[in-house]
Amino acid sequence: MKISIKFKISLLVFLIVSVVFIVVSLIISGQLKTTLNREIEEKAVGITKSLLRASTRAILTNNELMLAEDADNIGIADHEVLYAMVFDKEGKIWAHSDSSVKKGKRLSDRVSSGALSSLSGFYKQHVIDPKTGMGILDVSSPIIVSGKKVGVVRVGYSKAESDKVIRKINRTIILVVVAGIIVTIAVSFFFIGLMVRPIEKLTQAVILFGKGRLDKKIIVKTNDEIRELADSFNETVEILDKTQVKLRRRVRDISTLLNAAKELNFSLDMKNLASVLLYTCKEHINAKSAAFFILLNEEQDLISFHISSGIQSDTNMVFDPLDPVFKYITKNPKTYRFSELEETCKSTDKANLDKLRELNCEMLLPVIVKDRVNGFMVIGPCKYENNYREEDFEFLSTLMGMANVAISNSYLHTLSITDGLTKAYLRRYFLFRLEEEVKSVKRYGGGIAVLMMDLDLFKKVNDTYGHQAGDKVLKEFVIIVKSLSRSTDLVARYGGEEFAILATETSKEGAGYYAERIRSNIERHKFDIGAAKINITVSLGVASYPLDAEKMNDLMAKADEMLYKAKEGGRNRVCLMENAVKIPEK
C-alpha cells in the first residue's frame, strides 16, 4: 500500500505532539495533585495536633467530658473531617466524634492497628471509605504523658473535595491537550503541505520522466535545498531532452543514409544515382530547392547534365571543371557554404559564382573523382530555419562520400560495358540484356526485335582515308543511330563495323520502319573525316521475338541471316524474315 510522505510526516508530528502534550499534562496534573495532597495533609495534621493538645490536657486533668467535647468540636469545626477519636493504647475508645460509637469499643481494623503501632510523630494512612468509596487521609499521633504512651488521637480527613478539584483540572487539561493537538496538527499539516508540495511536484516529474516525458519542468518558489534539487532536475531534463533530440536526428540520419546506401549500391545508372542523391538531400534537410550537375561519363569535358527541384530560374547551365572555383574545390574537397566560396573565389571566378547565386546556392557538395570535380549538388535555402545546422553538414558530407564511391563505380561500370571508341555497348552486355528481355517477354508477353547493322564497304574507308578516318565514321555513325533511337533501345558494337540494336516493346513491323529510318538517315548523311566529307551506307537485318524465333540464339541467328541477305541483295537495304526488300521511308 502506498503511503505518501505528507501522511508519514503528519503522523510523526501527531505522535510527537501527542506524546509531548500527554507528558506535559501528566506532569502538570501530578504537580497539582501533589500540591493539593500536601495542603490536605497540612490541614489534617493541624487538626490532629489540636486534638492531640486538647486530649493531652483532658487526660492530665482526668476530664473525660472535655475529651468528648474536644472530639465533637473537631468534627464540627471542619466539615471535611469525617471522624475524630481518642482511644487508649489497647484500642478502646475514650471519645469519638460520632455519638453512635460507644465508649470502650475496641478497634481492631487494619487502619486502627496501624495507628496503634505508631510510637511518635504523625502517622498518615490513605484509605478508601468502603461505604462511600471516597478517599480518606487518616492521621494519627500517640498521646505521650510523662514519657509514656497512654493513648492515640486519630483524625479522618476527607479527600473528596481535592479529588473533585483534581478531576476537574484533569478534564480541563485533557480538553486543552486535545485542542492543542488538533490546532498543532492543523497548523503543522498546512506547513507540511507547503514543504511537501515541491517534493510531490518533483515526484510527479520523476514519474513522467520515467515514462519518457521530458517536457515537464518543476517550478518551486521556495529558496531552499528543494529549490536547488528542482533546478538541478530541470537542468538534467533539459540536457537529456536536447540529447534525445540529437539522438533522434542521428537515428534519422543513419536510417536515411542506410536507405540511400541501398539505392546507391544497387544502381549503376548515373541519372538514377543523381535523382536518388538530389531528393534524399533535399527532403532530409528540408531544403527549398536543389540541383545536381554531373558528368555522365568521364570523357565529357563540360558538366551539363542536371536534374533539379524547386528551382524556378532557367537551369540550362554548363560548368567547366577546369574553372578556378572548381580547381579550388579539388584542392580542398569538402562541403562548402556559398558564403565561404564567395569570399575565397570572388576575384578569380565571378562568372561561376553568379551562376551559383542564380541557383539560390546555400551549400555546394562536390563530386570528386580522380582529382577532378565531375559534378556537384547545389542546396538552396532551408524551408523552416534561417541557417542549416552542423548536423546537416555532417549528414551531407557522409552522403556525398558514399555518392563519390557510387559515382566512381558507375563510371567503372560504364567503362566495362561500353566500347571505348563509339560509346556503344559491348557485345557481352548486349547479349546479357537480350537474354533478360527474352525471359521477360516469355513471362509477361509482348515483343522485342533485334537489328543487326553492318557499314557497307567500310574496309575501303580505312584503306583510302586511314584508320583514324574510319574511327571518326564509326563514332559519328553511333551518334546518329542513338539520336534516332528511344532511351529504352540498346545500341551495341557487335564487332568491327558491325552493330546491333535491341528494340524493346517493338513489333516486327515497327522494327522494320525503325531500321529503314536508320538506313535512310545514314545514306543522306555526310560523314566529316577531316580531309573530306564522304557518304556511307548501311545494311540491316531484322528479326523479332517470338514471331521469328523461340530462343535467343535462334533470334540472333535469324537477324544475322537477314543481314547476310541484305548484303547479298545489294547492300544499303533492310531485310526482314521472309522478304529482302527495301522498305519505303515512312
Image (cartoon, rainbow, N blue to C red):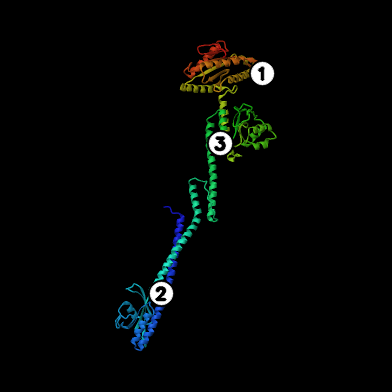
Q: Amino acid at mark 3?
A: His
Q: Amino acid at mark 2?
A: Asn
Nearest to N terminus: mark 2 or mark 1: 2
Nearest to N terminus: mark 3 or mark 2: 2
Say which element carries label 1: loop
The residue identified by callout 2 is 37
Q: Nearer the viewer, mark 2 or mark 1?
A: 2
State the residue in front, 90 or 586.
90
Nearest to N terminus: mark 3 or mark 1: 3
Task: Say above or below: 98 vs 384.
Answer: below
Task: Say above or below: 34 vs 461.
Answer: below
> In the rendered image, which quarter contains the C terminus?
top right
Circle 1 Cα neighbour tier, 10 Å, few/some/many (<14 / 14–19 / ≥20): few
The residue identified by callout 3 is 284
Circle 2 Cα neighbour tier, 10 Å, few/some/many (<14 / 14–19 / ≥20): some
Outermost residue, bottom side: 61
Task: Name the residue rendered at 45%, 59% in the picture.
Answer: 12
Residue 530: numbered disc:
1
Q: Nearer the viewer, mark 3 or mark 2?
A: 2
Image check: 562 left or right of 161? right
Task: Say above or below: 453 vs 310.
Answer: above
